[in-house]
Amino acid sequence: MKPRVHQILATLGYGDAIGNEVLGICRTLRAAGYESEIIVETADPRLEDLTVDYQEMVEDVGPDDLLIHHFSIGSRASRTAFALPARMALIYHNITPPEFFLGVHPQLVKQCYHGRRELTAYPGRVDLALGDSEFNRQELDALGFAPTGVLPVVPDFAHLDMPADPRVLDAYDDDWTNILFVGRLIPNKRPDDVIRFFHAYKTLYNPRARLILAGSYSGVEGYLAQLHTLIARLGVGDVQIVGQVTNAELTGLYDCADLFLCASEHEGFCVPLIESFYKRVPVLAYAATAVPSTMDGGGVLYDTKDPARVAALMQAMLSDHAMGDRVLAAQDAALDRLLAKDFGGTLLRFVDQVLSSPRKPLPPVAYDFWRQYKLADELAALRHYRPSAFQALPVAPDETVVAELEHRRE
């Protein structure tokens, strides 16, 4: 009987790169005859029926099982996985450095800091550490993980093969030049720089140009307000911030786009670059972190933050048809190389490698870990189902009152 190979992660999102990879891994494992579940702390309601709550699996995971742990942020599911007796392979999706969110999202600062700190406990725990890009693998090497490898992201483009939303085509399929960026509107992706570069292009070269920013800004509404302030201060028109979009809307946006412009300063892979290749939209991207390896010779990279110089590159790509053809040909070749990679075969070889290797010692955890774990669960349940119980707790004494009482005792 084959050992069970489960995946565990903090949250399973709908339509995002990690979520799509998790579902692809599950299909591959089950097709190869492995019993496999997706174990999560939270999940998008549309995917909950495909998952198992991590608390329900604690008693079920044994030493003969293999856990594939997707690490993208610290979580209770992550810490629980660490303490379980199963073998473990880690897939690292990168954690954004917390300094990007200072003054923007205190909770993300905390989560990213603790996630990166938590990761340093895993080199002695995992039997194999995989990056989903060479950039991420190198970061694992630097942290002392061994052995390491790359499980490539091979995106599924089915979500872009559907008919485009006609409302998007009605709005943007015209004789204007459409500059597109797709990605969450958060500081590390630098949509503010995209706006500055677009302003320079529109001012210097093409007044009949519009910028479309498509991506969620949930939880970072304060940063969204900063972007609107920047737009107003620059006096740049025709900037459309459309938020999170459906697959049909995304298809329409790619169909209408003349150029994909990326200014991100931190990416673990950046799937929208490859989506643009697939939809044959020329890509101009800032050469930082994983972006050059993801593009693999396709598109055009730049290494400046000077809006006038980036605008000149935009103009060259959009006005020189011979250059545009060369860029698209290079993107086609890069996409062909990516799609030729055997994702399923690579995954199963890594699984065989872990299962056939001598396993590492059981994880070192505190003697009372599981007792504290149980108490924490009971406390969380009490907080959820009987919040009034917490209102009955005595108010913390004022420090000056405590000091006065201690002084009187003396």
Image (cartoon, rainbow, N blue to C red):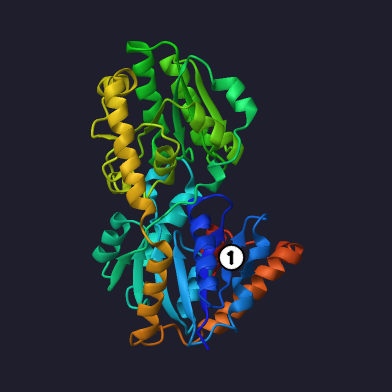
Q: Nearer the viewer, residue 192 or 300?
A: 300
Q: Where's residue 151, x and y in %?
A: 37, 63
Horizontal relation, residue 80 to residue 164: left or right: left
Residue 121 placement: quadrant: bottom left
- Which SS class for mark 1? strand
For image coordinates 41% across by 87% down, the residue present is 362
Q: Nearer the viewer, residue 392 or 26?
A: 26
For image coordinates 53% across by 69% down, the residue present is 77
For image coordinates 35% across by 35% down, the residue present is 263
Residue 300 placement: quadrant: top left
For image coordinates 73% across by 62% down, the residue present is 387
Say which amino acid is labelled 1.
Answer: Glu
Horizontal relation, residue 223 to residue 13: left or right: left
Horizontal relation, residue 393 to residue 122: left or right: right
The residue pinned by badge 1 equals: 41
Q: Nearer the viewer, residue 177 or 222?
A: 177
Horizontal relation, residue 169 to residue 3: left or right: right
Q: Does the rendering let one see residue 406?
A: no
Q: Where's residue 212, x and y in %?
A: 49, 27
Category of crowding for the residue at label 1, using alpha-carbon neighbours closer than 10 angstroms: few (below 14), some (14–19), many (at least 20): some
Q: Where's residue 2, x and y in %?
A: 50, 85
Q: Against 251, is 140 above or below? A: below
Q: Does the rendering let one see residue 330?
A: yes
Q: Against 328, is 94 above or below? A: below
- The count of marks equals 1
Q: Where's residue 371, x and y in %?
A: 57, 84
